[in-house]
């Protein structure tokens, strides 16, 4: 039973990362961005309940898990682990979502987390257990923090346009806040759409858009595929006025 905690925690951490990636993909398919699927909420609560799951469903029955790992094939144990995680999720909190058609993706998240846990745990326990002894516990414990740092800070900073549709809402708003001031009147709409994909979709290259965020507000008007008005600044009690007249293109 040596190295069980180290192996199981690493496996569950990778399952947690897989859960988040799965939810991002599901959210983009259903809502066209991760924000629409409340990825930030899922990120927080999944982390909290996985710790409870780890204590109740992994550490307590660890002897049984080890026996099944050594007895079953990789495929069988991985599939069983996925089902086990799904059942554990339903027991802990998943029953709340059973009547919600808008959030059924969380069940897929839990199942994928279990699959990755089972696959990783089986491979390490049966083939790489001795190699894992050489790895210090601190890198394994800090892996979740490292992932969050890359996902929530480094990725949006280095590749904001790519990250725009795959990060939680508050990070998405920060990208929006930092990107809009880079544009000015006369800039091409295409460049704005590349910088903030999916945010500004206007029919016939004409339209307007505005928003009041937590500490930022803006208005953008487009005519003939060019920005003809752009205003932004700190949030105020009222938003900017809108309604510029459409002008013929030269």
Image (spheres, helix red, strand yellow):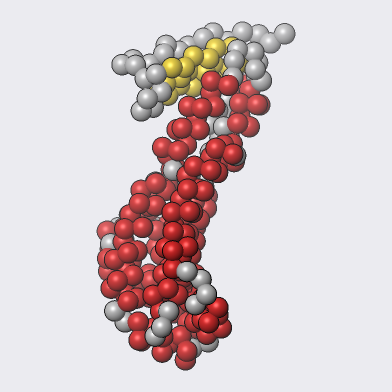
Residue 235 screen position, x and y as percent: 37, 20
**As drawn, 87 above or below 21:** below
Side of 56 where 235 appears, left or right: right
Residue 225 screen position, x and y as percent: 65, 19
- Asked if residue 223 shows in the view, the reply is no
Residue drawn at point x = 59 percent, y = 15 percent: 184
Q: In which quarter of the image is the N terminus?
A: bottom left
Quarter where residue 187 is shown = top right
Residue drawn at point x = 55 percent, y = 78 percent: 131
**As drawn, 59 above or below 231:** below
Residue drawn at point x = 51 percent, y = 27 percent: 178
Q: How many labels does the image show?
A: 0
**Between 74 and 62, the one nearer to me in the picture:** 62
Residue 222 screen position, x and y as percent: 58, 17
Residue 241 screen position, x and y as percent: 42, 11
Side of 212 where 162 appears, left or right: right
Residue drawn at point x = 42 percent, y = 39 percent: 169
Q: In which quarter of the image is the C terminus?
A: top right
Q: Which residue lies furthest to the right in this view?
A: 250
- Asked if residue 185 shows in the view, the reply is yes
Quarter where residue 63 is shown = bottom left
């Amino acid at each position: 039973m040596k190295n069980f905690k180290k192996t199981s925690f690493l496996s569950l951490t990778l399952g947690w990362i897989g859960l988040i990636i799965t939810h991002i993909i599901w959210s983009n398919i259903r809502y066209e961005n991760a924000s629409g699927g409340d990825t930030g909420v899922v990120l927080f609560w999944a982390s909290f309940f996985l710790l409870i799951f780890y204590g109740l469903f992994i550490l307590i029955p660890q002897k049984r898990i080890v026996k099944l790992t050594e007895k079953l094939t990789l495929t069988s144990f991985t599939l069983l682990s996925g089902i086990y995680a799904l059942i554990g999720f339903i027991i802990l909190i998943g029953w709340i979502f059973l009547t919600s058609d808008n959030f059924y993706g969380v069940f897929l998240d839990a199942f994928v987390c279990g699959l990755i846990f089972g696959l990783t745990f089986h491979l390490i326990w049966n083939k790489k257990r001795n190699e894992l002894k050489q790895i210090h516990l601190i890198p394994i414990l800090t892996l979740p923090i490292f992932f969050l740092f890359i996902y929530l800070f480094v990725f949006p900073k280095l590749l904001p346009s790519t990250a725009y549709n795959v990060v939680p809402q508050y990070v998405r708003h920060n990208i929006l806040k930092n990107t809009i001031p880079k544009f000015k009147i006369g800039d091409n709409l295409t460049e704005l759409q590349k910088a903030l994909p999916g945010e500004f979709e206007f029919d016939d290259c004409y339209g307007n858009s505005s928003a009041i965020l937590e500490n930022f507000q803006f208005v953008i008007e487009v005519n003939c595929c060019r920005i003809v008005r752009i205003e932004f600044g700190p949030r105020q009690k009222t938003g900017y006025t809108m309604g510029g007249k459409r002008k013929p293109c030269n």
